[in-house]
Image (spheres, rainbow, N blue to C red):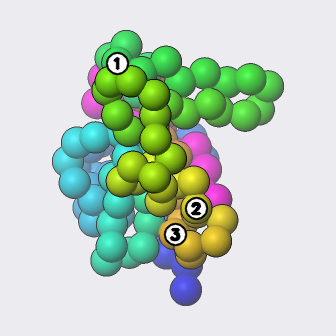
Amino acid sequence: MRFKTSLRAGQILTNNELMKEFSVANSGGMRKSNKNNVLVIISDHTKGLYDDKYYGNELHYTGMGLEGDQELNYRQNKTLAESNKNGVDVHLFEVFKAKEYIYIVVW
């Protein structure tokens, strides 16, 4: 069963609202909720920590890990990589202004 949200594309949430809506942790770019079977992805363009980029309509998201090559079998990278077959809904947010999480899409 899919997680139901009333969020619409373009809607802006605070971090507290995001945490409450999805039952996820208060920090991190990949936040998993086992309770709701969702993975919240946050592409934060304000911090410069990762270099997520769009190529056409496709977001190239960096994933988890700060050193060396990214590993697809590492924690939530694996959850995201297998999301089309593991039943986890993925919700994408982007941040262009500190503390404003813009809801983009669910897949």
Q: CA distance from mark 2 to mark 3?
A: 8 Å
Residue 82 is labelled as: 2
Q: Residue at x 36, y 53 (%)?
A: 75
In this rendering, is residue 4 above or below 75?
below
Please tell me whether residue 25 is drawn above or below residue 95 in the rendered image: below
Disc 3 residue type? Val
* Mark 2 touches mark 3? (CB < 8 Å): yes
Local packing at callout 3 (Cα closer than 10 Å; few below 14, some 14-19, many 20+) is many
| 33 relative position to 104: left or right | left
Identified at 46% across, 41% down, the residue is 71
Q: Do residues under tags 1 and 2 come within 8 Å of each other at their CB atoms?
A: no
Q: Nearer the viewer, residue 15 or 11?
A: 15
On residue 35, which mark appears? none
Comparing labels 2 and 3, the label whose residue is closer to the camera: 2
Residue at the farthest bottom position: 1
Q: Which residue is mark 3?
A: 88
Q: Secondary structure at mark 1?
A: loop
Quadrant of the image for the N terminus? bottom right
Q: Earlier in the sequence, mark 2 or mark 3?
A: 2
Which segment is the magenta one? 98-107
Q: Residue, x 57% and y 54% (percent of image)?
A: 81
Q: Can see residue 83? A: yes
Residue 8 visible somewhere in the drawing: no
Q: Is residue 33 above or below residue 65?
A: below
